[in-house]
Amino acid sequence: MSRIGKKVITVPPGVTVTVRERELEVKGPKGTLKSPVPEGISFKLEGDQLQAERTSDELAAQHGLARALANNAVVGVTEGFTMQMDVVGVGYKADVQAKRIVFSLGYSHPIEFPLPDGVEAKAERMPTKASIQQYQTTLTLSGIDKQKLGQAAAEMHRLRKPDAYKGKGVRYAGVALKLKPGKTGK
């Protein structure tokens, strides 16, 4: 039983959904996305309601997956997705230049990170992040494809993961880090 798969997706006005055998094509004001449809799963479009259906109960996991991917496509072409990354550390910085981000993360050289197509970035210093010591910059990533956005954020995070003692590195905004206490001096 897939509770997610049973939910109906409401297609907002201005969005067109084309149902094909192995994919859904979703067009909206922000762009076009294609969502794969696993074998044994089908979609029915009635008015502004999109419903996922499966052929057998063994496909419950794919049922929920296909519905979630279709919903992400609909949300992506209407509202889009955003994700924030914090660059923390003395001397650490990130500079957005056209389709790339240049990081200075304590290595002997700057790191150039090319942004994938469909992902845009903006760097700014947020005044409300006083709770983070050595806070430098917040990168705001935005795009219509949730998977590409998450993959780009994961690759940035991998450039310099937050260390366990001070939390220096590239980290996800809003995710609390549990820091180790360090030496006590006795």
Image: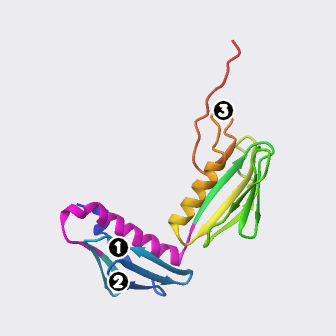
Q: Quadrant of the N terminus?
A: bottom left
Three-letter code for the amino acid on which mark 1 is drawn: Val
Q: Which is nearer the N-term, disc 1 or disc 2? A: 2
| Residue at mark 1 | 37
Q: Position of residue 44 (x, y in %)?
A: 29, 81
On the image, numbered disc 3 is attached to which residue?
165
| Mark before the other along the chain sequence, 1 or 3 | 1
Of badges 1 and 3, nearer the viewer stands 1
Q: Residue furthest left?
A: 56
Q: Where 93 falls versus 181 (above or below)?
A: below
Q: Residue furthest front?
A: 109
Of marks 2 and 3, the one in the foreground: 2
- Residues drawn in magenta: 52-81
Q: Is residue 104 left or right of residue 76?
A: right
Q: CA distance from mark 1 to mark 2?
A: 9 Å
Where is 13 relative to 122, above or below? below
User: SS for tag 2?
Assistant: loop
Q: How far, Cα to Cα, is label 2 from label 3?
A: 51 Å
**Mark 1 touches mark 2? (CB < 8 Å):** yes
In which quadrant of the rendered view does residue 70 lie? bottom left
Question: Which residue bears the numbered disc 2?
Answer: 20
Mark 1: give few (<14), some (14-19) or many (20+) Cα within 10 Å: many
Q: On the picture, is 161 further left or further right than 123?
A: left
Look at the numbered disc 1 and give the secondary structure of its residue.
loop
Is 41 included in the stretch rendered in magenta? no
Which callout, 2 or 3, points at the residue further toward the start of the chain?
2
Question: Which residue is depicted at the point 66% across and 66% down?
Answer: 115
